[in-house]
Amino acid sequence: MGIDCDSLVRKIKGIDRPIINQFERMKLIMSLNIVDQGFIMQDPSDIIEICKQHNVSKVFKHEGYNKVSHIFGIDDTSARLVIVPDIPELVSTTEIITRIKNGR
């Protein structure tokens, strides 16, 4: 399972992110029984080489990727895209930060 490095998260989400650093996030991911391997991506294109090296057959992404025309690891490899449905009851980190800032 791959996670974005801190600088990628910062680039996408803003200067105050991530809240949990890449090493702590990797520990969380690796503590899941269903995860065999973990890696930290320095660039979105890293997934292309990882998919090729490890013969990855499926790449899992959230529903937001339904609207994306080019997905690294899919268009450039033989891997198949699997969309994982969002769970409406869950709250994103962005929403948690907004609630804290607004005193809710």
Image (spheres, rainbow, N blue to C red):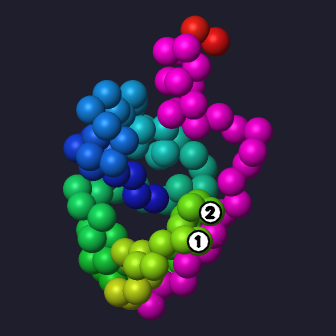
Tell me residue 72's x, y (percent): 37, 75
The disc at residue 50 is none
Amino acid carrying label 2: it is Glu
Cα–Cα gap, marks 2 and 1? 6 Å
Amino acid carrying label 1: it is Asn
Tag 1 residue: 66
Residue with the most extreme front position: 102
Find out whether the residues at labels 2 and 1 contact each other: C-beta distance under 8 Å. yes
Tag 2 residue: 63
Tell me residue 79's x, y (percent): 48, 84
Quadrant housing the C terminus = top right
Tell me residue 71's x, y (percent): 42, 75
Tell me residue 64's x, y (percent): 57, 61
Is residue 83 visible in the rendered image? The answer is yes
Bounds of the magenta segment: 78-102
Nearer to the camera, 68 or 42 = 68
